[in-house]
Image: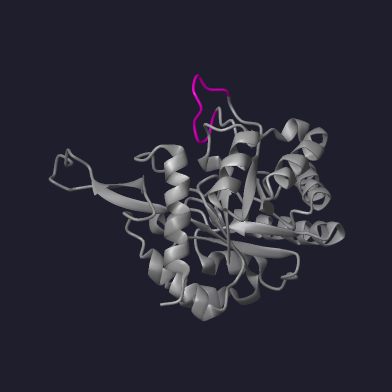
Amino acid sequence: MKFSVFTVSTPDWSPEEAARVLSAQGWDGVEWRVIDQADADSPGFWAGNRATWPLATLERDIPKIARITKDAGLEFSGLGGYARCDDHVSVERMLAATAALGAQRVRVTVPGVGESDYRDEFAAARGHFEWVAERAAAHGVKALVELHHRTLTASASSALRLIDGLDPEHVGVIHDLGNLLIEGQEDYLAAFQLLGPYLAHVHVKNVEWRPRSIPEADGSVLWDNHWATLRTGQADVRNYFDALREFGYDGWVACEDFSTELPLEERTRDNLAYLRSVSAPN
């Protein structure tokens, strides 16, 4: 397996800093975040993230993205795009940029749940992904749908329903360990087997559930999810990698750690050491 960092999780660093530090630590690659984000008074994961490339200037930035990545000796594990499957103009731009960079794969998002009837949204998304698959093939790249809570594809089963029958050379699934702790958890190995050739990429982060400090008026205790370190969250990370090896997965694993207990540079260094440890055969 090869290990990369999705730069949504490195908000304090400029692209140059991110590439330099990750390369020095021994990471194999980088997954650049691409989105027109909101400004913020200080860098954050989802706003003011300094390691993010704007979608608005993506075509102009392609030579710089390529140079920074290559000069650091890093590979692309893919592009972390946010273009939604029904935004054909933005998806086309992301696919073209992925091809121009030689990044091979790019995330294409799906609608969230609750916007309208799930059945109608899902049918519409299937139609859009048929178009996405055709355009990805035209560009010679692969479009990825992520398993993500509160979306149409929170589980491996739902993602397979969305893309089943489309060409696995040009569409695939990002299996996300942390997201599935929030919604969509299925047995690891069974999920990999279910996805088969559509298992195209892996994201790792971790989560823990904590009870709210103040119970409801009737005494009910409600629980909230919080980001945790890879070592301390509730996912059995070693078992996850055991299942990946048993299935035969040997592709990219991108880390996107949203915990903040450790300073960023120490966090990325420790994550790589931990991932190498748990992914090694017993």
Quadrant hosting residue 139: bottom right
The structure residue drawn at horizontal position 61% and vertical position 53%, both measured from the top left corner, is: 121
Q: Residue furthest front?
A: 24
Q: Residue furthest left?
A: 219
Q: Position of residue 73 (x, y in %)?
A: 69, 50
Residue 149, placed above or below residue 2? above
The quadrant the N terminus occupies is bottom right
User: Which one is nearer the viewer's eye here, 155 or 252?
Assistant: 252
The quadrant the C terminus occupies is bottom left
172 left or right of 41? right
Q: Residue furthest right?
A: 138
The structure residue drawn at horizontal position 42% and vertical position 42%, both measured from the top left corner, is: 266
Q: Is residue 185 visible?
A: no
Write down the region rendered in magenta: 39-47
Residue 92, placed above or below residue 176? above
Q: Could you tell me what secondary structure mostly forms the magenta stretch? A: loop
Q: Is residue 203 magenta?
A: no
User: Which colouring convention does the figure follow?
Assistant: one colour
61 left or right of 112? right
The structure residue drawn at horizontal position 83% and vertical position 61%, both measured from the top left corner, is: 140
Q: Position of residue 133 (x, y in %)?
A: 77, 61
Q: How many marks?
A: 0
Q: Position of residue 14 (x, y in %)?
A: 61, 31
Quadrant hosting residue 93: top right
Q: Is residue 41 magenta?
A: yes
Q: Residue furthest top?
A: 41
User: Which one is nearer the viewer's eye here, 198 or 221?
Assistant: 198
Q: Position of residue 142 (x, y in %)?
A: 74, 60
User: Which one is nearer the viewer's eye here, 265 or 113?
Assistant: 265
Q: Is residue 149 visible?
A: yes
160 left or right of 225? right
User: Which one is nearer the viewer's eye here, 281 or 254?
Assistant: 281
